[in-house]
Amino acid sequence: MDQYAVVGNPISHSKSPLIHARFAKQCNQNLAYSALEAPLDGFPEFVKGFFSDDSCKESHQGAGKGLNVTVPFKEQAWALCEHLSEGAKLAGAVNTLYLNEHKQICGENTDGIGLVKDLKRNGVVFEGKKILIIGAGGAVRGVLQPILNESPQKLVLTNRTLSKADSLVAIFSGLGAISSAGFAELKESFDIVINGTSASLGGELPAISKAIFASSTVVYDMMYAKELTVFNAWAKQQGVDTVIDGLGMLVEQAAEAFYIWRGVRPKTDEVIQLLREA
Ligand code: NDP
């Protein structure tokens, strides 16, 4: 049986095995998908072992066909790829690995496509819109190209450490209308506000003015939780009607990886629903 896995450290919290098991059932694909913890100081060896023929002989399982990569290994995965898609080259991090016909390790970043698909699934149009993205870490870097491809009127990037936002603007400025601004400079409302900081994980809010919100603003927090995330709760308090969390992005990025590996596109709605109810 073809072997797939998500690799991270820690990894026990991962929902990816559940998501891919549902996709496999839905698409009649015979595969196994597990969650594997790689040592913090041994990620490259772990990946090479997973894809090697020797490792299948030892484990008496089928060959390792594909890996999803999560925190803290996405940048290391990018560095060890022998072939990267154009999007992955710019993203500087990959979350999906597979071997090509020459047995080279190939990398893709499906996080950004996942975010765009989830927003579209929720009826959001990017073209001609004013978009604010808060944060300049790995997740944000991965979503900039797919969003700029949608032709927004302008994309403003803001970050607690402004120099990191400036660096990303320098990398992506050839792809569209992207600029940076410090937290204190933000005094106008946006059509779409995306929180790509990890502040919500610690129950914190970025120190930003509520002037970024109008009631019609669509607010997206890349983090997901059973309850409203702190950021989305704050946006609601400011009168925002539509707030969305990152659960759909998680499922959509997984669907894109599944498509890369298996050539079949699973339906995401029922899996998102299942995770919401779980
Ligand atoms: P990184 O550690 O790479 O980046 C963290 C970012 O958050 C930095 O820009 C940092 O700013 C900012 N930040 C952290 N704390 C605060 C704070 N208190 N106030 C303001 N800014 C803050 O993280 P990732 O980019 O990997 O992840 C970001 C978020 O995206 C996480 O919540 C993660 O769970 C989520 N995510 C969701 C996915 C999904 O599928 N739904 C996929 C990937 C990520 P500074 O540079 O100043 O330190």
Image (cartoon, rainbow, N blue to C red):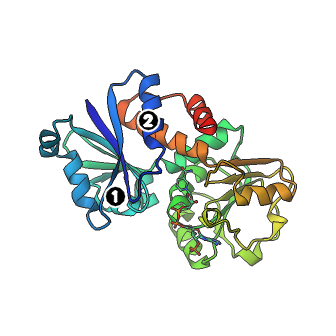
The amino acid sitting under disc 1 is Ala
Left or right: 88 as drawn, with respect to 235 = left
Task: Kindly state the secondary structure of the residue where label 2 is placed.
Answer: helix
- Residue assigned mark 1: 77
Question: Is the CB of the residue bearing disc 1 within 8 angstroms of ligand 1?
Answer: no
Q: Going 29% across and 62% down the picture, which residue do you hit?
A: 39
The amino acid sitting under disc 2 is His
Q: Is residue 107 above or below residue 32?
A: below
Residue 260: mark: none
Task: Please tell me which residue lies in front, 219 or 187.
Answer: 219
- Residue assigned mark 2: 20
Ligand 1 found in image quarter: bottom right
Q: Going 50% across and 67% down the picture, which residue do you hit?
A: 171
Q: Is residue 190 visible?
A: no
Mark 2–mark 1 contact, CB under 8 Å?
A: no
Left or right: 28 as drawn, with respect to 196 = left
Residue that protrudes farthest toward the top in the picture: 28
